[in-house]
Amino acid sequence: MTTINVELGSRGYQVVIEAGVLGRAAEWLKPLARGRRQVIVSDSNLSHHRHRLEAALADGGIATAAIELTPGEGSKSWATLESLTDQLLDLGIERSDHVIALGGGVIGDLVGFACSILKRGCHFVQIPTTLLAQVDSSVGGKTAINTRAGKNLIGAFHQPALVLIDPETLATLPVRELRAGYAEVVKYGLIDDADFFGWCESNGAALIAGDIALRTAAIAHSIAAKARIVAEDERETTGKRALLNLGHTFGHALEAETGFSDALLHGEGVAAGMALAYAYSADRGLCPAADAARVAAHLRAVGLPDGLAAAGITATGDTLVDHMRHDKKMAAGTLPFLLSHGIGATYLDGLVDLADVAHFLDRQPR
């Protein structure tokens, strides 16, 4: 078992990483339950994991109730948020209760946001079941829903009380979802850890293929890196936490172009976005072209998109940049970009000309 502390003072919490921890969840949740019924929110694809969790909690003397949502990014909506909060209120949730978010990033983002506003703030526990959620979105307290204008534009910082990560849940995950989650693993190497990117090049294919030891190691390394950054800059006020958005500015534009649909999963958009960020950095003479090529080659090698063509994007540069203008990081008409001086050397550039970005995108293969 690996336990990582997210050091945020009174809002700090533990991340527990252990194969099989889902079946032993009662020992971690009983102190939080305080004898009250625990509400588990999941989606209809997760009944197997929910039944395991319900049985484990029952064995520990903890009663449960379940709320089942529709799978997919479309559930991160006003309508689902309203329905979820109404159901939680009908179940008698109190401010001191802990709602359990069992699922991927959509469930975690939605439940976390619901808990941030329910009765002006109640608690929640993250039990992520996808690789993407296990290495990234379950930790750090970013919660949100999507709107017509863009992704994650309505939300709040609301930290979980506990995160339980069971790598065994990945055994039922489709390979496409595994690859999408793996993009966020690669991100940690590209931000500031060139050695870890080298580890990914050596082990990424085996990790995706099912090696649970490699998966556990990647999860622990990623969460430790994120916990350190979040502790330094919880609300993205200093720019340090912004580094975690590598690939997301380009990637969110690609997702918006596909209507935030299954045509392009979030992690696939991030992968293509990281390749574009490196390609743009090389195009501007900021990053060695060999490093940009190395990033693209690794993404291709594990089956992830490495640019517009591989992501199925045919839109013009102006169209994609228009999507970027809705990015929540826009300030005084300027959008900071995560660019790179090389592998493991990501930095925040606040002087990027969006017209230049559009021109660069127009020159990319379709």
Image (tube, rainbow, N blue to C red):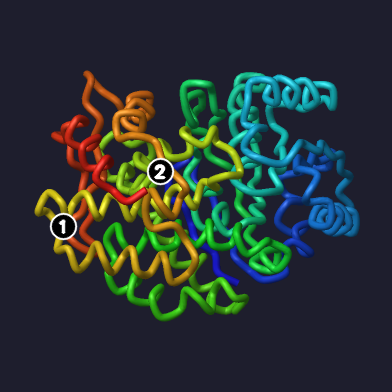
Residue 363 against residue 326 in the figure, above or below: below
Residue at x-position 72% and y-position 49% = 31
Does any portion of residue 358 appear in the rendered image?
yes
| Left or right of 129 in this view: 268 | left
Task: Label 1: state its secondary structure.
Answer: loop
Residue 79 against residue 196 in the figure, above or below: above
Residue 344 is situated, as x and y percent measured from the top left of the image, at 25, 63
Q: Quadrant of residue 167?
A: bottom right
Residue 38 is situated, as x and y percent measured from the top left of the image, at 80, 41
Residue 68 is situated, as x and y percent measured from the top left of the image, at 81, 38
| Left or right of 246 in this view: 207 | right
Q: Amino acid at mark 1?
A: His
Task: Label 2: state its secondary structure.
Answer: helix
Q: Nearer the viewer, residue 328 or 276?
A: 276
Which badge, 1 or 2, comes first in the chain's sequence?
2
Q: Report the mark closest to the observer, 1 or 2.
A: 2
Q: Amino acid at mark 2?
A: Gly
> Label 2 belongs to which residue?
251
Residue at x-position 78% and y-position 42% = 40
Residue at x-position 64% and y-position 20% = 78
Structural crowding at the residue carrying mark 2, measured as other residues with C-alpha within 10 Å and reported as few (<14), some (14–19) or many (≥20): many
| Left or right of 118 in this view: 241 | left
> Label 1 belongs to which residue?
341
Residue 318 is situated, as x and y percent measured from the top left of the image, at 30, 29
Which label sits on residue 77? none
